[in-house]
Amino acid sequence: MQEGLSLWRAFVMPVLCVTLFAACASKAPAPTETRQPGRPAVMSGDAVPVVARPGYYIVKKGDTLYSISHLNERDYREVAAWNGIVDPSVIKVGQELRVTPPGDMAPSGDAAVVSGAVAVAPAVVIDSTPSGVSSSPAPLTPIASGAVPSAAPVGQKTEPKGGRVAYSAQAWKDLQAVEKLPSAATSVPVTASVSTPVAQSQPAAQSKPAESKPVAAASEDEPDWVWPGTGKVLATFNDSSNKGVDLAGNIGDPVIAAGPGKVVYVGSGLRGYGNLVIIKHNNNFLSAYAHNSEILVKEGQAVQKGQKIAALGNSDTDRPKLHFEIRRQGKPVDPVKYLPPR
């Protein structure tokens, strides 16, 4: 019996210890998460990115095309056109929308080349005139070869070169007219013929986007406005710091629609506005009512001028007041210039 116990201790116990040790050693380490600097953590499928590219906006829950346009001081029709949106009421959470004109991002390389060519063109042509034009018409070909290749047919545009006159149909026509003149008279018309197309053809100016031009006004009349509240004016319009007027009042005072229209936004998603109502009066005019304590209308609801739409409050501000704005084609305007005199 003692001999059997000794054999079990001598052989079986070491085997059990080795097996137990191996099992513990093979246990996988706990999973860890490695994050690279500058990269956001992986989000679930329902999460929305919080950072948009420059010139873009990512749609959040509660946003409408009108509220996004209001936030970026754009006409909602412009934003819809830049993003191929047919129905302004249909946008999706997480959708990235362009809120600046496409040409605002960076000037194209072609525009930069054209701009440089226009700036230096007169000096180059005037310096080369005495040596190349005063003799026979044949030497004119090297002078104009930088701007218009001799092999190119009439009417075919070529890439403008730096240090040459910017190409235009008029410049090519004038150059042909110069070549047909007698050699004795060519030195005088060269300067005049070149200076004219430089003033007429401004490719760089044409390539600039028409950002400052608002969408063409529709044939709708301006709404018949009324004051949205009875309180005194606390702050007037200032394009840099106050996009509307602030009216004093007490919490619960009625806020009325300044004109007839359709409610296109109700919510508190725009920072600095609190509980906000936006009414579309027509294709040109919107009005906004901020800092409400209670909202009495819903999106899509038609309202009449003078109808109570909210109760005055102090949401997202330091005191009870009504902040009122009028937007014409997306741009803030001074409401006092549109409201009737008090």
Image (spheres, rainbow, N blue to C red):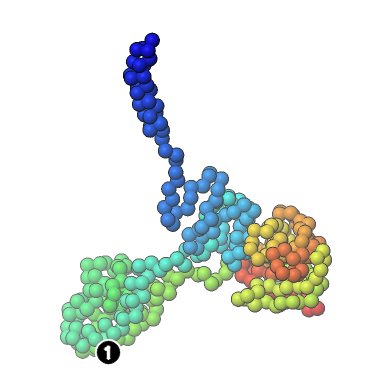
Label 1, secondary structure: give it: loop
| Front residue of this view, candidates 253 and 36 | 36
Q: Quadrant of the N terminus?
A: top left
| Front residue of this view, candidates 7 and 64 | 7
Vertical placement of 319 versus 122: above or below? above
Indicate the position of residue 61 as horizontal and vertical percent values.
Answer: 62, 52
Vertical placement of 266 versus 108: above or below? above
Residue 324 appears in the figure: no
Vertical placement of 89 versus 125: above or below? above
Q: Which residue is drawn at 69% across and 62% down?
A: 274
Query: Residue under circle 1?
Result: 188
Q: Examine the image and state in which quarter residue 152 appears.
A: bottom left
Q: Which residue is drawn at 24% across and 70% down?
A: 149
Indicate the position of residue 307 as horizontal and vertical percent values.
Answer: 81, 62
Mark 1: which amino acid? Val
Specify whether 37 is left or right of 69: left
Crowd tier of the residue under label 1, counting other residues whose Cα lies within 10 Å: few below 14, some 14–19, many 20 or above: few
Indicate the position of residue 231 as horizontal and vertical percent values.
Answer: 80, 73
| Count of numbered circles in the view | 1
Q: Which residue is drawn at 77% across and 65% down?
A: 313
Indicate the position of residue 256 as horizontal and vertical percent values.
Answer: 79, 65
Vertical placement of 320 versus 237: above or below? above
Q: Which residue lies furthest to the front in this view?
A: 2
Q: Examine the image and state in which quarter residue 21 appears.
A: top left
Q: In which quarter of the image is the C terminus?
A: bottom right
Residue 148 appears in the figure: yes
| Front residue of this view, candidates 265 and 122 | 265
Q: Examine the image and state in which quarter residue 305 appears.
A: bottom right
